[in-house]
């Protein structure tokens, strides 16, 4: 209990004392992603639009896929719901894939005793969420313009639904950025992990599809990304009642993962300079 309280205090102090540094490194991470391209920041808008169009054509019209949740579900309904899942998957998978290199790739900062190294994974995850929120805004615009949003109260649920996933990705970034210093093979493993996560997170199907397969559902239901994707679709696109038990679970996992990541990072941080 004392360790949890100490870790929480450390994170609070970090956010308070170094918020400007956190912001600067977040902006830098966003700029680096588009540096050297002719269109620059325009790609932050263009990429999700192209992706949405591609998935609409391929899965909605060519494969005629459906979630079978809404009555008279159309290809557009399927594409919007799938895009909602993909944008949350991408922010999670990119955080996992890049996390092991966040510290290793900055040896000059590791050797500066006064630099708060937690800023590196947190700022990079913040940049990923910046792009995810742009994609979310485009999803909202598309859904509104196509008349797919009928209950605007769903907008009020968005911060409550997405905040746990933000905590989860931040915790994973802290955890694996620390472990990546000591176990360089984690970078190679993450490619497989993200592929498994893609098919285990209800991106291309609804959870109701696999609930009839008990042995599979009993495993996948513990995936917080799957639960968050389903919650987002429910409140935003499907106008279904929110599952409060699932929401509570995602909050528990998010807070727990953030504490674990911060705790491991803090405990191993002193050895970073010696290993690197």
Image: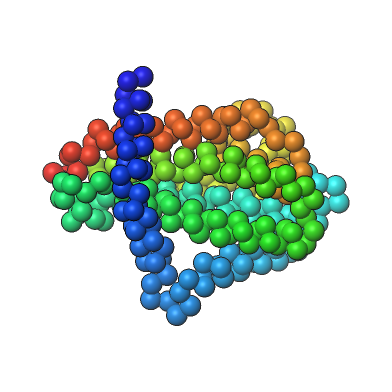
- The relative height of residue 253 versus residue 77 in the rendered view (above or below) is above
Which residue is located at x 18 percent, y 38 percent? 270
Q: Relative to the observer, which residue lies in front, 141 or 49?
A: 141
In the rendered image, which quarter contains the N terminus? top left
Considering every residue shown, the one lying at the far top of the view is 1
Left or right side of 257 for 223 = right
Which residue is located at x 31 percent, y 34 percent? 10
Query: x, y (%) of residue 15?
Result: 36, 43
- The relative height of residue 96 versus residue 218 in the rendered view (above or below) is below
Left or right side of 144 for 107 = left
Left or right side of 25 for 127 = right
Which residue is located at x 47 percent, y 39 percent? 168
- The relative height of residue 254 versus residue 97 in the rendered view (above or below) is above
Query: x, y (%) of residue 71?
Result: 85, 47
Which residue is located at x 70 percent, y 45 percent? 154
Query: x, y (%) of residue 112?
Result: 16, 50
Look at the image and tell me whether residue 226 can be seen.
no
Q: Quadrant of residue 53?
A: bottom right
Q: Quadrant of residue 2?
A: top left
Considering every residue shown, the one lying at the far bottom of the view is 38
- The relative height of residue 117 versus residue 260 in the rendered view (above or below) is below
Q: Quadrant of residue 208?
A: top right
Count of numbered circles on the image: 0
Query: x, y (%) of residue 184?
Result: 27, 47
Left or right side of 52 for 17 = left
Look at the image and tell me whether residue 250 can be seen.
yes
């Amino acid at each position: 209990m004392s360790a949890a309280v100490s870790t929480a205090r450390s994170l609070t102090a970090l956010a308070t004392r170094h918020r400007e540094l956190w912001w600067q490194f977040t902006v830098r991470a966003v700029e680096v992603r588009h540096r050297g391209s002719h269109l620059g920041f325009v790609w932050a808008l263009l990429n999700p639009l192209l992706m949405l169009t591609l998935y609409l054509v391929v899965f909605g019209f060519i494969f005629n896929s459906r979630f079978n949740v809404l009555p008279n579900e159309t290809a557009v309904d399927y594409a919007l719901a799938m895009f909602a899942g993909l944008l949350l998957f991408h922010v999670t998978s990119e955080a996992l894939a890049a996390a092991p290199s966040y510290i290793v790739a900055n040896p000059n900062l590791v050797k500066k005793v006064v630099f708060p190294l937690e800023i590196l994974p947190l700022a990079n995850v913040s940049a990923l969420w910046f792009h995810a929120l742009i994609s979310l805004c485009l999803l909202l615009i598309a859904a509104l313009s196509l008349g797919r949003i009928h209950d605007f109260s769903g907008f009020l649920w968005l911060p409550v639904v997405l905040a746990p996933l933000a905590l989860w990705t931040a915790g994973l970034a802290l955890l694996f950025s620390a472990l990546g210093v000591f176990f360089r093979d984690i970078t190679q493993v993450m490619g497989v992990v993200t592929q498994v996560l893609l098919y285990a997170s209800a991106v291309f199907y609804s959870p109701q599809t696999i609930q009839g397969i008990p042995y599979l559902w009993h495993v996948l239901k513990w995936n917080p990304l799957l639960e968050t994707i389903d919650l987002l679709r429910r409140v935003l696109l499907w106008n279904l009642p929110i599952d409060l038990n699932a929401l509570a679970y995602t909050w528990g996992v998010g807070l727990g993962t953030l504490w674990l990541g911060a705790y491991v990072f803090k405990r191993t941080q002193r050895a970073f300079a010696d290993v690197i």
